[in-house]
Image (cartoon, rainbow, N blue to C red):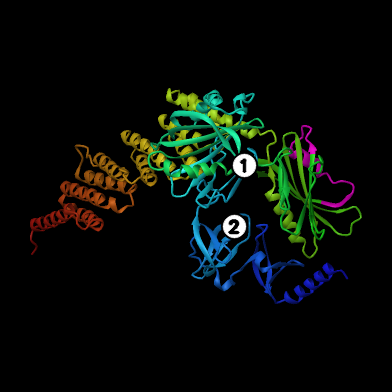
Amino acid sequence: MSRPLLALCFVLALSSTLLGKDEGRQASVFIKVSGNTIEGKVIEKDGRVYVQKGSSTLEFGKDEVTVNYAAPAAESGNKDASKGWVQITRKRDGSTVRGEVIDQTDESITIRPKGQSTVTFKKSDVEVAEMSDPSSAEADLGDRYMDYEGRFQIEKPSAEWKIRKSTSPETRAFMTLNGQDAFVTVSVKPAPGAVNAAYSSPSKESARAVQSEVEADLRSELSKPSSIQGDAAELHGAPVLEYRYEGSFPNETTVYQFIEQRFARDGLIYAIRAAAEKKNTFKTVEPKLRDAFAAFSFIATQGGDDEGYNDLIKGFGIVRPTPKWSVDARPFDEKEPVVIVENNKRGEIHLYVNEANSRTEATFLDEYLKAPPTRTDFKVVDKKEARRNGQTVMTYHCTYFEGKAQNKSDEQGLVALADNKILHVVGIAPYADADAKDVQAEVQKVLDAFKVFDPKRTRLGNGALAVQNYTTGVDQASKKQWADAIKSFDEAIRLYPDYARAFYARAEVHVQQKEWKDYQNDLQRVIELDPRPETAQRAAGLYRIEADTRTKDKQWSEAYRAWREVVRNDTAKDSKSRGDFLKFYDTWWNEEKKVPSGKKPEEVIEHWEKAIETIESSKWSDKEFEPKMAVMLTEAGVGILQADKKAWPKALGFANRALALDKACKQAQDLKKQCDDARKQLEQSKPKGK
């Protein structure tokens, strides 16, 4: 028997002995070299880790994996566990994993990484750091971000940097320097027609020839950019154009100093911009900004490794589900460029490329799912529409016997349209064998992670058009051409549905038109797309316009709701919003407490009761508001007592409610005394009984 076969038999025998019916503990195993996670029964022995998954047993060196044992049921289920997103750093090896907190106790924390099962850690073994939801604009996207449409990648130069999501079509990547008002962005757009020849020979003269392009781009991003100076520089040893300028973003007062390196490749114009707050930050961080330029690099249009394969020309990216699958890339095969096979031949995944010939994903799938003559007992379990990389695809699930096969097959697949090609992913697994469900789940994982790219880079072109429409809309809005501006912003958002700045600009126009519901919807979308403090601060400005307008129009309840949003979003240290909100109540109360002339005492009393009821239905639940509410209650009580001394119990109730809010309210204390005097006067005026 050969040495490898003998070793394999020994491992299986040992595994069978170790992982008996009642042996091992359920755990999640993180494989360091691949970054994948598997779950199963685990035994650690003699420096090795044995993982039983289905009928198979996998073996790893202890230093090759990190094992996270599931908490016993009795230790979990803490209903008071705080939710949110965290990053877990393992103390023994420094590896990290991010996920949403599902449960935590004093001893352990359980999280669910995106797209994975839950994992439990002992708190003594890890460091826990809070983070934002990775789907939000504030999320850290990891050490590397790859843009397949723009065909580039950017890596963090050091742990000081954070890569964040962009919500703007002109900004493909966004990297910030921790603790500093400094950042680096990468913009990509198709060249309008032929690429300017000046890009091919960077110099001070050619920089001047491209400067008008730079200025046009900056008009869509900065307000009043100035001092633009161009020259030649180097990036990765190659000549590029470099520009220096300064400017501020719309609706912001901070002035930034910029360095931009600009170059062309394959019909695309790239701009890497590094910037920092001019007054106090730029000079100190400029060396780090310069270093960050080297974080940019191009990615190959075709290629892959043991983990998967990308083909930007055909328009797909595919990854293997676990290390027990092998990727067979065939870049010169136009019909079947990739096959992924489970090492024990238990499953296989094929990617086929077909001419679309005017067929959609749905029509192609309908043709495919017509039961072929070689398949018997053919059943379609599921067929539905899904999304991959923002593009619509069709997924399906069917079962059948192939030819004269004795065992039934389980097929899951995906159909996508990339340019004029149909991409068809076919995943075959056993239907009902011992580990069939595991293999089927791994096929599903490949389909879930499948990426559809845009070979003609239409979305990049749409992004550039979206910016043009946005810039046109801004110009129209400045001329108060409101209807035209709305149409331009509508088109920008249609072309790029996550365009936060276009949503904000459209909200501004809706405010000018008093289209309150529309502006609120747009503003909410802005905050969802870009939940930075700066965005909330700008939102507070629009809410304030609504609040002031509604107050002027005496739409009190609506004004109250707008003021509440002003205060919630305005977190500036020198904010006057809270004080202005209190002044709004003064204005509102002065209107509510006006008693029409000629009213009977009982009608006056009813007026004061309704006035207080109106204010209380929109009261600000804040300690700062309580003294003001106490004064209003007291004034209502005084009005009631003046209308009819016999109503002193009702007036006294108002005084007591006021003192419950503000014990030091002098007016309420005086009202109590007036009520007591009224009671005594009424008692003295009663005829004495026998």
Under circle 2, the secondary element is: loop
Quadrant location of the C terminus?
bottom left
Percent position of residue 61, x then y: 69, 68
Q: How many marks?
A: 2
Q: Which residue is drawn at 57% across and 39% down?
A: 172
Label of residue 113 in the image: 2
Under circle 1, the secondary element is: strand
Q: Tell me which amino acid carries mark 1.
A: Ser
Q: Examine the image and state in which quarter residue 663 appears.
A: bottom left
Residue span colored magenta: 354-378
Q: Residue beneath label 1, please? A: 297
Is 370 displayed left or right of 643 in the figure? right
Quadrant location of the N terminus?
bottom right
106 inside magenta stretch: no
Q: Tell me which amino acid carries mark 2.
A: Pro
What whole-number distance in Å separates the C-alpha atoms at marks 2 and 1?
28 Å
Q: For the residue carrying disc 2, how many other residues have a C-alpha within 10 Å: few (<14), some (14-19), or many (20+)?
A: some
Instruction: Evaluate if marks 2 and 1 touch, with contact meaning CB atoms under 8 Å apart.
Output: no
Question: For this rendering, which residue is in front, 626 or 15?
Answer: 15
Question: For this rendering, which residue is in front, 641 or 65?
Answer: 65
Q: Compared with residue 208, is residue 5 higher up or lower down, i.e. above or below? A: below
Work out whether mark 2 precedes mark 1 in sequence or the reverse, and give the earlier one: 2
Percent position of residue 647, x then y: 19, 52
List the single residue furthest toward the right.
Answer: 404
| Closer mark to the observer between disc 2 and disc 1 | 1
Question: For this rendering, which residue is in front, 681 or 196?
Answer: 196
Percent position of residue 218, x then y: 49, 30
